[in-house]
Image: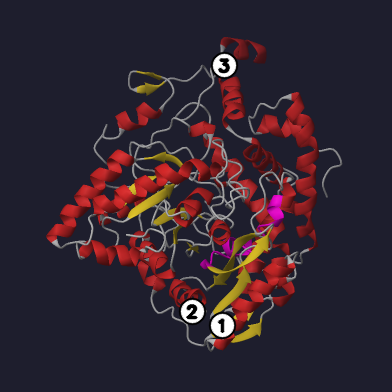
Amino acid sequence: MDLSTLTIAEARRALDAKEYSALELTEAYLGTIAKKDKDIHAYLEVWADSARQEARAADETIARGTSQALTGIPLALKDLILVEGRIASAGSKMLEKYSASYDATVTAKLKAQGAVLLGRTNMDEFALGSSTENSAYGPTRNPHDTSRVPGGTSGGSTAAVAACMALGALGSDTGGSIRQPSGFCGVVGLKPTYGAVSRSGLIAAASSLDQIGPIAKTVADAKSIFDAIRGHDDSDSTSLPDSFFENKVQIRRVLGVPRAFLRAGIEPDMLSSFESTLKALLDAGYSIVDVELPALDYALAAYYIINPAEVSTNLARFDGVRYGLSMPAPTIGETYEKTRAAGFGPETRRRILVGTFVLSAGYADAYYRKARAVRELIRADFARAFQSVDAIVLPVSPVPPWKFGEKSDPLAMYAADIFTVPVNLAGVPAMSVPSGSVEREGKQLPVGFQLIAPHGGEDTLFSIGDTVARRP
Amino acid sequence: MTDPAIDVRALAKLARLEVSDAELAKLEKEIPDILAFVETIKKADVSAETKADGLRNVMRTDENPHESGKYTKQLLDAAPAREGNRIAVKQVISRQNVERRK
């Protein structure tokens, strides 16, 4: 088997045809990880022993003829998705020794399919960042150029898939954390509709924005993982009923481009790449029209108020008392302060402080409540645009992967999220599909093309995404 | 809109986060910069936005409790300190605090 071209669909066929066993497939991935990951650092921990056990169990299922889409398929999980009895650190020193008390719903669903879980992948601490440089365990390197970032926050998962160290992976997307690293690593990444995939057992960053989604080499593979993990769950109160997703097919073959918003600081060759993909869609029979989304001008600012506000409240649970790190101190107050100082990295502290400010008495109206109102404008802009188009298209990122340390100013890093955060504010689904490349210092770096659909419109994304991926 | 001098030390206290003097100096530049950036939303006209955001609480029915003690071990195993079947916590109200308040 050639892992560089292997897809989930092909592995499924070959496994069911007994051309190789799930154990052989798993061994091939464990071997690649052993060989490559010292240069990439996609994994924080590899679960070789349990992966082999799961592969053997998958082989028995296949022998019985009762395999499902992901039976025996080796996958990686971002380090904030709980697997009972396994460390889930969220890329933080705070949870360095935290062993999960239960399986996340998505973990249980993958286990029920007989998937093989290879290990947990690196990420920005508590899913705060855009490059995986904020991991407390060192950054992941981009397989296309190891002097550059893989994007973030799911950079470990996307690098693992891109470097053939997993056939697919789960990530989470709060402001672009699946789509942007997928674009940077040249793989497919889906941020589903808010509420499409249960977040029970996902270590929360910003709860009104977080969503779990698949990362894979092809659109069809991303769909097969999505189909395995989606569905209503009583354990997540934001989970949508399954009926919500019925009859959401595209009807018009019309795509919208927010031209005014597109000018926001994009590098010229990234824009050319986007235009050439648009041209290919035009040639494939899609009409392309301009759409106006005026509130998107405020999306980045609204996001960087709402995200820190929710992060500061969510991370208040880390107090050195119930689980995670605990620093000994004479009083309970000092236990809190010292534990949080020792456990949280620099970006996490910045978000907590900014969040504390925007929620504080006297400022909450001008910042947090204003940002909530702007968020509603953004939702309304998308809803209006989707009355006349099937999908809205945007670049994933205004810039290609940057060099380590290049964006040490927090605001420079935030600015790179311009094209992905509006999607999370609106709660709509979006997908990053590899489409072309740009050259930097003699290296070809992948470019992602972003498709955005109305709530529940994942099938529209798969259909158009397939056209984008297949373009000559 | 932002105060010229944002009291980062007071924010850290509110957030129960110990901050060293060296870090404070860095944060006293970074936090106001971030707030100055997000302040651009003050220009957004939200006067037309009268629609309620449609948020509502979703609660499960309080029924069918699991059998008592089923998860006790897993949850206690995660705690940094325990005494028997309890999580051990530093004293919250000390004699010193009580006397100070008198």
Q: Residue at x 30, y 29 (%)?
A: B73
Does the stretch in magenta take in A417? yes
The residue under label 1 is A281
Q: Which residue is mark 3?
A: A329
Mark positioned earlier in the residue sequence (2 or 3)? 3
* Kind of residue at disc 3: Ala
Q: Which mark is residue A467?
A: 2
The percent position of residue A406, horizontal first and vertical second, equals 71, 47
Between A235 and A33, which is closer to the camera in this rendering? A33
Tell me: residue A95, above or below residue A123: above
Secondary structure beneath disc 2? helix
Residue B17: numbered disc: none
Mark 1 vs 3: CB contact within 8 A = no
Chain letter for mark 1, please.
A
- Residue closest to the eye, B89 or A79: A79
Q: Which residues are magenta?
A: A413-433
Q: Image height check: is B102 above or below B28?
A: above
The kind of residue on which mark 2 rests is: Thr
Of callouts 1 and 2, which one flags the residue occurring earlier in the amino acid sequence? Answer: 1
Q: How many angstroms separate mark 2 from mark 3 (CA)?
A: 59 Å
Q: Are marks 1 and 3 on the same chain?
A: yes
